[in-house]
Amino acid sequence: MAKYILAHDLGTSGNKATLFTVEGKLVGSQVHSYDADYFNGTWVEQDAEDWWQAVCHTTRNLIESTGISADEIGAVSFSGQMMGCLCVDRQGNPLRKAIIWADQRATKQAAQIEEHISQKDFYHIVGHRNTPSYGVQKLMWVKDNEPEIYEQTYKTLNAKDFIVFRLTGKFYTEYSDGNSMGCFDLCNLKWSEELISYAGIDGEKLPELKPSTFVAGGVTEEAARITGLAAGTPVVLGGGDGVTANVGTGSVHPGKTYSCMGTSAWITTTTEKPIFDEEMRTVTWAHVIPGLYAPNGTMQTAGGAYNWLKNTICKMEAYDAKLHGKSPYDYMNEQIAQAPVGANGIIFLPYLLGERAPRWNVDAKGAFLGLKSENTRGDLLRSVLEGVTMNLDIILNILRKQVKIDEITVIGGGAKGSVWRQIMADVYNTRILVPTLLEEAGSMGAAVTGGVGAGIYKDFDAVEQFLEINSVHEPNPEAAAKYGPVKEVFDECYFALEKVFPKMNF
């Protein structure tokens, strides 16, 4: 009888293997890092063999360190980085390094697609804009620049799909990662023959699409020998990392919403139909749960802006923290808590690396506006957290046009500070829920998906066994009212500078 579920979270910096009991309790986790090659300005690649070695090491170490028996693991499932392009031959051998999500080389290929179809029409098929970020544009680049590799390519895979092949010998992807290829018909959950034609690629090079709960097969004898898993253990496809987190935060029914506050940040909800924004400011992913969707808006620099603040303006706080064995953020948050709502008139535009949602402007710049002689250091610091949160609030309000959102579960490093969480509650005018485990949403989502796929759980409501809410922040009505006009000015500041930003590239 199954006692455990093993989840692998294949990220950009490494793989985390996490073991849960079938009752939803965390037993242990192991992390194995790997490198990414950044070169030519916008090119980013990884060696798929490093992914496999990381999975093998973490699996073996986790089984050994916890002292469990491998045959007690009822399923293996995955959360993985999306929007990549790994070309493999018929035997599943990588033909070149994987071009990963962060790579932006395929600008010419995205432009070629736009010669055939408008951004708006593309958006209404895929749920996303046509950009160099997606898998099909990267495969087009391989065809144009490495034709010998393209000809040898049997299938194009994302990270978790490659590991599924190594464990089972089967080539599959599921709807969320299929959606990240950029040639996926979102409403009909199949490859778009129209977009494949415009891309000029061979559709046979795309893997077969299945639901995230699909059991690809059992662990082979060879894979069992290498990983320490028991042969025959069910391998469930899982999902892309941004979408498995929906499950791991309890966003498994329409209107259930979460926000991940990392270096970048996003707000994602769950709906029964895609959300198509008239201005294409948000995107929609295919959900891990069959029949549902995950509308989303991701901004570029959230926790990254806070970290920039720490490293540049707050060196004094960093010095004091080192002296007293504390975190610089402790000293920063003390000052932020003392500053008033609206930061005494300072507006911070958080566009330190351009912006994705809701601006979609690579030329956007960061800015402090409204500085006066009476402003304090605390005002300046608070404006950064408010600026990031007000930018996310624009995304939230786009989603709210089509779905009722009463509360938001927040995860990630930015969710650790109670001061920022209260700012979120007040800016969003919404209850903020904080789980005990802030960094395990992807792993928990993969585990629940694996449990459903293997028949351990009846449905995705099993996540309630995994998810423990540690604290709740209610919005302060007075603060929420004060933020109304501040949010309007924030938006006006961006548009006032929109034409100036491109002139500042000197």
Image (spheres, helix red, strand yellow):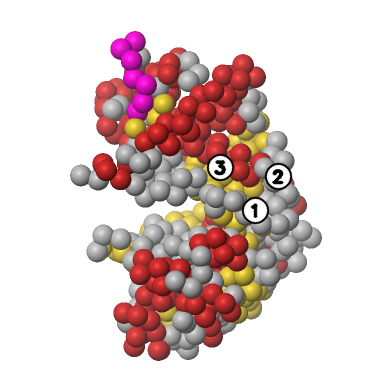
Task: Give the farthest residue toward the right.
Answer: 458
Q: Position of residue 303 (x, y in %)?
A: 42, 39
Which circle's residue, 1 or 3, is located before the other in the chain? 1
Q: Nearer the viewer, residue 427 or 95?
A: 427
Which circle's residue, 3 or 2, is located before the other in the chain? 3
Mark 3: amino acid:
Ile
Residue 403: mark in rendering: 2
Measured in 3D between alpha carbons, the distance from the residue under mark 1 to the one under mark 3, in whole angstroms, is 12 Å
> What span is in magenta?
368-374
Task: Give the farthest residue toward the left.
Answer: 506
**Relative to 71, is 345 above or below?**
above
Q: Main secondary structure of the magenta part?
A: loop
Mark 1: amino acid:
Ile
In this view of the protein, can residue 489 be seen by the observer? yes
- Residue at left offset 34%, top offset 47%: 363
**Relative to 125, is 89 above or below?**
below
Which quarter of the picture shows residue 172? Answer: bottom right
In this view of the protein, can residue 325 be seen by the observer? no
Q: Secondary structure at mark 2?
A: loop
> How would you rate the neighbour count of disc 2 (Cα within 10 Å): few for under 14, some for 14-19, many for 20 or more?
some
- Residue at left offset 66%, top offset 70%: 189
Q: Secondary structure at mark 1?
A: loop
Q: Which residue is mark 1?
A: 275
Which circle's residue, 1 or 2, is located before the other in the chain? 1
